[in-house]
Amino acid sequence: MTKDIIDTFAIVRDVPESFRQCVSTYNTSDDIDTDRAILQHQLYCNTLSSLGLNLIRLDADDSLPDCCFTEDTVLIIDDLAIITNPGIQSRVAETVALEKTLSLFKDVSRISLPGTLDGGDVLKIEKTLYIGISSRTNAEGMRQVASVLEPRGYWIKPVEIRNTLHLKSVCTYLGNGLIILAEGYFDVNIFSGFEKIIVPKEEEYCANCLVVHKRVIIPKGFPITKALIEEKGLPVIELEMSEFRKADGALTCLSVIF
Ligand code: CIR
């Protein structure tokens, strides 16, 4: 019998006043509304708390416009925090605060140049880490993760991705062998052994979902995908994510859960 390990903590970081200066490729005429982003972030935090997670809430840093996207800065695997080396220079200093906090809880290891890695490229399913090789994460970053985790019994599998920011921008794991993904961004045969929900083209943003204690949090406004998830018997919670979407961010990006 396998024992479920229950996630207890979520590290989040407040939205900085400088959020509008974040890195973004999102094509919109609609500027980011920072006040609305702060409100959406608060509702996100409230939701994680209401699902039983203890929040570790870090202060925003206005010199780091993307700092609310904590997922990219660290991988937490068992007793180890692997501090990443984000693949865009403006985000590298975000790791400092995360390392300071996590060193209170975990052993620490670091990805270093020439390796780069964003946490959004790492999809962990049981003992396997699928790592997106992307514009942010390179093969050397992946190799460094492998050198730390393979001796601990993990498997590392590269996934070449295209036309999207991160692997998890287009693919997340819902548990019990079920993956949700958008087609056309990587070779989906890598997940041949899994049951899949394929999101319709017009709802691709909903391929990034956040599972907390068997509830699936999805972005608001994607009714087809919502129904597809509910058909699998999974309870869904919707959250408005409009301002984070404009920043190329999604639900998993805003926390590190362990
Ligand atoms: C960036 O481009 O790095 C941020 N604006 C968005 C990061 C989103 N993070 C994620 O997908 N894990």
Image: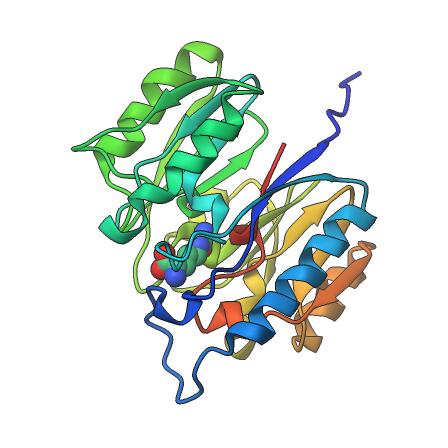
Residue 154: x, y in percent? 47, 20
Q: Taking 196 as reference, is 43 left or right? A: right
| Viewer-nearest residue: 217 or 125 | 217
Q: Quarter of the image for the N terminus: give it.
A: top right
Q: Taking 130 as reference, is 41 left or right? A: right
Determine whether 70 is above or below 21 in the image: above
The residue depicted at 47 percent of the width and 35 percent of the height is 98
Outermost residue toward the top in this view: 151
Outermost residue toward the bottom in this view: 29
Q: Quadrant of residue 64?
A: bottom left
Residue 251: x, y in percent? 58, 57
**Ligand 1, what quadrant?**
bottom left
The residue depicted at 22 percent of the width and 33 percent of the height is 115
Residue 80: x, y in percent? 50, 19
Mark count: 0
The residue depicted at 32 percent of the width and 49 percent of the height is 91
| Viewer-nearest residue: 36 or 172 | 36
Residue 162 visible (yes or no): yes
The residue depicted at 63 percent of the width and 32 percent of the height is 258
Residue 169: x, y in percent? 46, 58
| Viewer-nearest residue: 176 or 254 | 254
| Viewer-nearest residue: 157 or 120 | 120
Residue 135 visible (yes or no): no
Q: Quadrant of residue 7?
A: top right
In the rendered view, how is the structure colored?
rainbow
